[in-house]
Amino acid sequence: MDKDKMLGLMRFWLFGTFVIVFAAVSVYTGGVLGMGLKILSVGSFWLAMALTAVLCIVAYYIYKGYLNKKA
């Protein structure tokens, strides 16, 4: 498999991971904890989403560096 195809697949999986985490946290806090849409106004919720996004981006660049080093 070529490098561009592998990076595209990694981008797809990391974006999917972010979407799943966002949905799971939103449903859990909104439904189970009974906060509803009030969760969208909580700063710690957005901090957790930003941290998840940053971790996904960092993982992508680490993988990209790994592929460049390997080739």
Image (cartoon, helix red, strand yellow):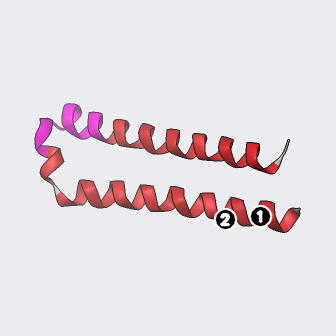
Q: Could you tell me which residue is drawn at 70 percent across and 49 percent down?
A: 7
Q: Could you tell me which residue is drawn at 59 percent across and 40 percent down?
A: 12
Residue 35 seen in this snapshot? no
SS label for mark 1:
helix
Residue where numbered disc 2 is placed: 62
Q: Is residue 58 left or right of residue 9?
A: left
Q: Nearer the viewer, residue 38 or 7?
A: 7
37 within the magenta span: yes
**In the rendered view of the protein, which quadrant contains the C terminus?**
bottom right
Q: Looking at the magenta stretch, what is its main secondary structure?
A: helix
Q: How many marks overall?
A: 2
Amino acid at circle 2: Ile
Q: Is residue 54 above or below residue 40?
A: below
Residue contact between numbered discs 1 and 2, judged by CB atoms under 8 Å: yes
Q: Is residue 63 above or below residue 38?
A: below
Q: Nearer the viewer, residue 26 or 62?
A: 62
SS label for mark 2:
helix
Residue 21 location, x and y as percent?
41, 42
Amino acid at circle 1: Tyr
Q: Is residue 66 left or right of residue 52?
A: right
Label 2 neighbour load within 10 Å: few <14, some 14-19, many 20+: few
Marking on residue 17:
none
Residue 28 location, x and y as percent?
28, 36
The magenta span reads 26-38
**In the rendered view of the protein, which quadrant contains the N terminus?**
top right
Q: Is residue 25 above or below residue 54?
A: above
Residue where numbered disc 1 is placed: 66
Q: Could you tell me which residue is drawn at 23 percent across and 60 percent down?
A: 44
Q: Is residue 53 above or below residue 36?
A: below
Residue 17 location, x and y as percent?
51, 42
Label 1 neighbour load within 10 Å: few <14, some 14-19, many 20+: few
